[in-house]
Image (cartoon, grey):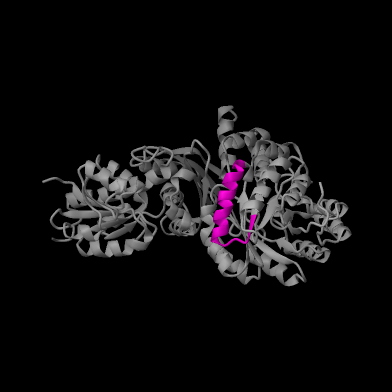
């Protein structure tokens, strides 16, 4: 694979996707320490939001230590060069949240829908584009639809005003060939001015390889997370990706040693558990299940004595999509009843 | 003279047609008019075949016949954009409006919680909130009738096939309206609503999760009893309303997991979200009819 001379923009997820792994309990001091470290290392874009996006604060997904507004107001003024993005899932957050994020000074709004339901994003993408924000359409669980379907949905988001479309491997299910096929199709068929991005999870150990495949196929933006801090087995570990890109002579604009140090000295110490491909995280990837289900399934296992792996496999069979965290306890209760445990 | 009140349905789409099929079985409401805007629409033709009078020029085509046909109730299954105008025109002729759009110009109506109150006061326009609201607010109310609820949250998961373009274009309206009604009708101090659209095939049944955070330690026995009673109330008009799991108590958190199976009249059984709207709308009209019949309310003079 030849990536020499290719330019890629890296987008850090540790303070948004990483919120899942921290049960949304990252402190303001930790947010500032991580983001200023990333800014200093040259990361151009950093996402700061509740794990489930603006307005994600809930019983269903978890109440965060601070509001989105408090996090954004703490981080945005501290940035020297990096820009801040916020995620929004229609059905959870509304345009009111989007306006709040804009007022806090975010540069990018990423509007996320399940990969077949892009038409719920018209209002939000339209408003973000009208406010002249960097507007990204984020097609989640992209392994669940064909390349043609992904393209059709991407075109909808493009028509609403998105200037960048992401193929998002929320379950960490994809293998490099699938990434190549989907990213290449988006790159070939979307408006040349529309950027294409890839967001990976490391549940099958493929996040770095998948990101390289995406760059080769034409992705201009790649999501990753310093030290991998993210849902499931984490996102593409950025310091690893940067080292690989360095070896391949791709243009990434990041200081490798500095991002290694942020990973080792700032992010690793704040983890509640090691971010790794454990049995349950591997099951997410293998069964094609939304990565943030991991800790919920582990908690259901502890409470109802049904193996997290069995719960996750069943959720995969049922075609569960992102945001259906409430299914986990419901299903664990039903399985426990069937086994005569309760 | 028949005790049935005569009704018009505005909007011959999926909702309007499902409503018509339910209404044809009603003891209290007789469907007389179906109102659309496209003479070629399948919904209008179907209504005609079922013996209804039809207008293809919108509500204006109905107005001249309101007195003649003694239309007392109208169901609006169009859109929020035209509802206000439809309501104004028909209210002026003494027709009670049941609003199945998200316009919500009238008070919210969740039948087992506050229908009796609206009907006995002869509210001339009542709004049926949202599908998620109809499926979940009875549960929030069941808890808040026992003790104070500081926070009520609902997650409605619906099949992709059952979500029409109107809801998709303005999904914020669903979350806002539902959250608002969780407070106003459910009795929670603060409300939060989440909607998830799932494209699985075969389509999944509507499911709803309700979480309430009570102010003080929950009275488990009283809440459980209240929830079972409320489920039975909803089952009177939506037989497929089913308590799957719960109530589960965890500290001050009370969680209930529901499934809503539709009757499969015109819409498939998985579309419990649409069925519960049409069933609640019809139940509402029936209550007006029952009270008018017993003399508890007097319909506008003609």
Residue A126 x %, y %:
54, 63
| Residue at x-position 63% and y-position 66% | A69
Q: In the displayed structure, does residue B278 sit left or right of residue A180?
A: left
Residue B57 x %, y %:
25, 58
| Residue at x-position 78% and y-position 59% | A7
* Main SS, magenta residues: helix
**Taking the image as drawn, is residue A13 in sight?**
no
Q: Look at the picture and state if A12 lies above or below A132.
A: above
- Total labels: the figure holds 0
User: Among all residues in the image, which is located at the extreme top?
Assistant: A339
Tell me which corner region of the image, top left, top right, bottom left or bottom right, holds residue A220: bottom right
| Residue at x-position 60% and y-position 29% | A341
Q: In the displayed structure, does residue B299 sit left or right of residue B224?
A: left
Q: In the displayed structure, does residue A34 sit left or right of residue B125?
A: right
Task: Name the image quarter holding the C terminus of chain B.
Answer: bottom left
Residue B241 vs residue B276, the one in the foreground: B276
Which residues are drawn in magenta? A144-165
| Residue at x-position 89% and y-position 58% | A257
Q: Tell me if residue A151 is in the magenta stretch.
A: yes
Residue A92 x %, y %:
55, 55
Residue B210 vs residue A242, the one in the foreground: A242
**Taking the image as drawn, is residue B24 in sight?**
yes
Q: Look at the picture and state if B274 lies above or below B93.
A: above
Q: Tell me if residue A99 is in the magenta stretch.
A: no
Residue B19 vs residue B119, the one in the foreground: B19
Residue B30 x %, y %:
21, 46
């Amino acid at each position: 694979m030849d990536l020499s001379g290719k330019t890629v923009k890296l987008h850090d997820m540790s303070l948004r996707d990483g919120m899942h792994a921290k049960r949304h309990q990252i402190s303001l001091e930790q947010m500032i320490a991580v983001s200023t470290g990333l800014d200093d290392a040259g990361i151009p874009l950093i996402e700061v939001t509740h794990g489930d996006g603006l307005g994600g604060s809930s019983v269903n997904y978890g109440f965060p230590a601070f509001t989105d507004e408090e996090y954004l107001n703490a981080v945005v003024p501290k940035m020297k060069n990096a820009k801040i993005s916020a995620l929004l899932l229609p059905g959870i957050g509304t345009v009111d949240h989007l306006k709040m994020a804009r007022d806090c000074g975010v540069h990018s709004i990423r509007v996320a829908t399940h990969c077949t339901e892009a038409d719920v994003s018209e209002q939000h993408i339209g408003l973000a584009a009208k406010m002249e924000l960097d507007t990204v359409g984020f097609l989640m669980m992209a392994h669940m639809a064909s390349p043609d379907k992904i393209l059709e949905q991407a075109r909808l988001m493009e028509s609403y005003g998105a200037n960048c479309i992401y193929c998002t491997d929320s379950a960490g299910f994809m293998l490099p060939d699938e990434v190549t096929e989907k990213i290449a199709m988006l790159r070939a068929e979307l408006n040349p001015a529309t950027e294409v991005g890839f967001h990976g999870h490391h549940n099958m150990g493929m996040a770095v390889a998948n990101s390289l495949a995406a760059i080769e196929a034409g992705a201009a933006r790649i999501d990753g997370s310093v030290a991998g801090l993210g849902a499931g087995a984490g996102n593409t570990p950025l310091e690893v990706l940067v080292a690989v890109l360095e070896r391949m002579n791709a243009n990434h604009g990041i200081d490798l040693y500095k991002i290694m140090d942020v990973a080792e000295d700032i992010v690793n110490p704040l983890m509640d558990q090691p971010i790794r491909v454990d049995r349950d995280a591997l099951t997410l990837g293998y069964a094609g299940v939304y990565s943030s289900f991991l800790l919920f399934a582990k908690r259901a296992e502890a409470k109802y004595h049904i193996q997290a792996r069995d719960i996750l496999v069943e959720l995969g069979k049922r075609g569960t999509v992102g945001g259906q965290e409430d299914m986990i306890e419901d299903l664990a209760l039903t399985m426990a009843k069937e086994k005569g445990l309760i | 003279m028949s005790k049935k009140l005569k009704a018009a349905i505005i909007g011959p789409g999926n909702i309007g047609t499902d409503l018509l099929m339910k209404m044809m079985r009603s003891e209290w409401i007789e469907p007389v008019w179906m109102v659309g805007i496209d003479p070629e629409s399948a919904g209008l033709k179907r209504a005609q075949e079922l013996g209804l009078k039809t207008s293809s020029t919108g509500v204006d085509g109905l107005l001249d016949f309101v007195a003649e046909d003694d239309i007392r109730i109208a169901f609006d299954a169009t859109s929020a954009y035209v509802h206000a105008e439809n309501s104004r025109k028909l209210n002026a002729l003494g027709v009670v409006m049941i609003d199945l759009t998200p316009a919500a110009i009238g008070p919210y109506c969740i039948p087992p919680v506050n229908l009796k109150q609206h009907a006995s006061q002869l509210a001339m326009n009542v709004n049926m909130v949202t599908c998620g609201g109809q499926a979940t607010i009875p549960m929030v109310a069941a808890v808040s009738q026992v003790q104070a609820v500081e926070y009520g949250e609902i997650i409605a998961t619906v099949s992709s096939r059952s979500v029409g373009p109107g809801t998709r274009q303005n999904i914020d309206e669903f979350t806002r309206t539902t959250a608002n009604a969780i407070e106003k009708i459910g009795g929670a101090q603060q409300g939060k609503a989440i909607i998830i659209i799932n494209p699985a095939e075969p389509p999944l049944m509507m499911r709803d999760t309700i979480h309430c955070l009570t102010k003080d330690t929950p009275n488990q026995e009283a809440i459980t009893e209240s929830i079972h009673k409320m489920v039975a109330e909803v089952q009177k008009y939506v037989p497929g309303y089913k308590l799957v799991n719960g109530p589960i108590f965890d500290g001050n958190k009370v969680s209930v997991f529901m499934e809503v199976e539709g009757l499969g009249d015109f819409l498939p059984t998985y579309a419990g979200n649409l069925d519960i709207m049409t069933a609640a709308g019809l139940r509402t009209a029936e209550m007006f009819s029952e009270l008018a019949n017993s003399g508890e309310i007097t319909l506008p003079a003609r």
